[in-house]
Image (cartoon, rainbow, N blue to C red):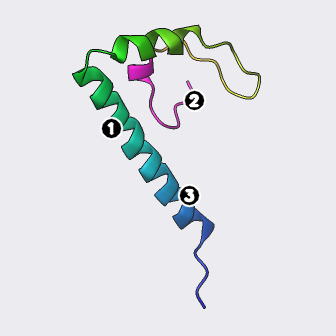
């Protein structure tokens, strides 16, 4: 029996998550609804567990720690 290495599972998870986010983002843009997500993103309250960001949703990148 072969056990998957956690890094492989993590990579697959991130790839699938990126695909879903890209799909939803393009769907919302196609239907002129992406501005709503951008507004919600900018109004989200700060969470002490996550670094704050002043970037727009469309400018965020995975793993950005600036």
Q: Position of residue 52 (x, y in %)?
A: 63, 18
Point out the residue furthest to the left here: 30
Q: CA distance from mark 2 to mark 1?
A: 24 Å
Do tag 3 and tag 1 residues touch (Cβ < 8 Å)?
A: no
Whether the magenta-drawn stretch holds residue 65 is answered as yes
The magenta region covers 57-66
* Residue that numbered label 3 is attached to: 10
Pick whichever of labels 3 and 2 is earlier in the sequence: 3
Point out the residue furthest to the right here: 48
* Residue that numbered label 2 is attached to: 65
Is label 1 in a helix, a strand or a loop?
helix
Q: Quadrant of residue 46?
A: top right
Whether the magenta-drawn stretch holds residue 62 is answered as yes
Q: Which residue is painted at 43% across and 51% down in the image? A: 16
Pick whichever of labels 3 and 1 is earlier in the sequence: 3
Q: Is residue 30 above or below residue 43?
A: below
Q: CA distance from mark 3 to mark 1?
A: 20 Å
Quadrant in which the N terminus is drawn: bottom right
* Residue that numbered label 1 is attached to: 23
Q: Position of residue 11 (x, y in %)?
A: 49, 57
Is label 2 in a helix, a strand or a loop?
loop
Is label 3 in a helix, a strand or a loop?
helix
Quadrant in which the C terminus is drawn: top right
Q: Which mark is residue 57?
A: none
Q: Position of residue 8 (x, y in %)?
A: 52, 66
Q: Quadrant of residue 56?
A: top left
Between disc 2 and disc 1, the foreground one is 1
Do tag 2 and tag 1 residues touch (Cβ < 8 Å)?
A: no
Q: Which residue is painted at 46% across and 45% down in the image? A: 17
Q: Position of residue 33 (x, y in %)?
A: 33, 16
Q: Is residue 47 above or below residue 40?
A: below
Pick whichever of labels 2 and 1 is earlier in the sequence: 1
């Amino acid at each position: 029996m072969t056990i998957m290495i956690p890094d492989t599972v993590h990579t697959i998870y991130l790839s699938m998550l990126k695909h879903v986010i890209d799909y939803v983002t393009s769907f919302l843009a196609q239907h002129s609804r992406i501005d709503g997500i951008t507004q919600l993103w900018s109004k989200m309250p700060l969470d002490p567990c996550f670094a704050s960001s002043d970037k727009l949703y469309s400018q965020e990148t995975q793993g950005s720690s600036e």
